[in-house]
Image (cartoon, helix red, strand yellow):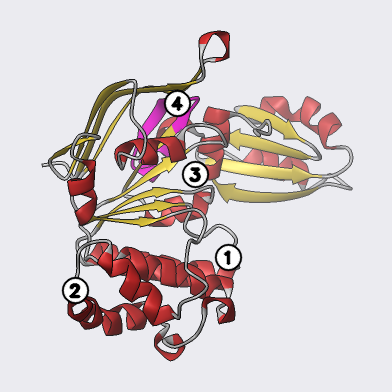
Amino acid sequence: MDVLSVRHLHKSYGQGEQRHQVINDLSFSLRPGECYGLLGPNGAGKTTTLKLCLGLTEPDSGRISLGGHNIPADARQARMRVGVVPQMDSLDPDFTVEENLLVYGRYFSMSDKQVRERIDWLLDFANLTAKRKARINELSGGMKRRLTLARALINDPELIFMDEPTTGLDPQARHVMWERLKTLLASGKTILLTTHFMDEAERLCDRLAVIDQGQLIAEGAPRELIAQHIEPQVVEVYGDNVSSWAGQARALADRIEISGETAFCYTTHAELLVQNLSGQSGLRYLHRPANLEDLFLKLTGREMRD
């Protein structure tokens, strides 16, 4: 049975001419033990989707089943088996690391004894054992995110919702977080992940959905989606005269996109492109395989979103 099932979900805000549809006929499901990613530009509906799945807001129409419970009718009961890592840390600055975990466990009707039996493992998992008695303002950004993850595991959840869990972290802290998430997946946990980091999604997600304007526009395993939508090789070309060069080189690639001072050349065979560029002065290039960011930009566009 699917851990989470979403079927034909619709959600709008506002009234009359000001009504704005945020989620438009969205359907997807999570299998036990997988990491499923929701990708999309700002305003695509990712965070609203998580709120709907948790029963924090009601859909206009559609069906949601979370752990066998109907949402939002049985949301409170369903959330007892769910962990949540929100975008922004909501740790209590008046409590120590240990006290944050202890108090949070009470929201799940856990006794202090039950929580304390898990605290040692959680602090070790988050690499925060030495910070047990530290106040929140004594922690680095990476430590706070790891504590937020540990807190989300206090009730030993089957499914963990993670809304951009590594936003604001430096590369080292991001890699530490990835290792923790891989450990959870290896232990059989299921993760629903939203992220703006394409390398994060490619590393962690078994399957993912790309959504835009509340609609699902692509779904599948990362490498399968890349192979389905993108030419296998990419040559990025940089320089002041790149637009002029690209105009003359379009016959050498399947397609070329210009963004600022960079030409993205997508091709099945890059030999002729590389040969041409080796004789160009004032231009630099990078030859690489296609990745998830290429897929994302092709499906959602390169324009900025607010």
Mark 4 residue type: Gly
Looking at the image, tell me whether mark 2 or mark 1 is earlier in sequence order.
2
Vertically, is 95 above or below 237? below
Looking at the image, tell me whether mark 4 or mark 2 is earlier in sequence order.
2
Pointer 2: what residue?
111
Tally of marks: 4
Residue range in magenta is 211-227
Vertically, is 174 above or below 242? below
Which of the pair 272/33 is nearer the observer? 33
Residue 214 image label = 4
Looking at the image, tell me whether mark 1 or mark 4 is earlier in sequence order.
1
**CB under 8 Å between discs 2 and 1:** no
Which of the pair 106/84 is nearer the observer? 106
Residue 292 image label = 3
Give me the C-alpha separation between circle 4 and circle 3: 20 Å
Task: Confirm whether the magenta stretch covers residue 170.
Answer: no
Look at the numbered disc 4 and give the secondary structure of its residue: loop
Vertically, is 49 above or below 141? above
Q: Residue 162 at x, y = what percent? A: 39, 53
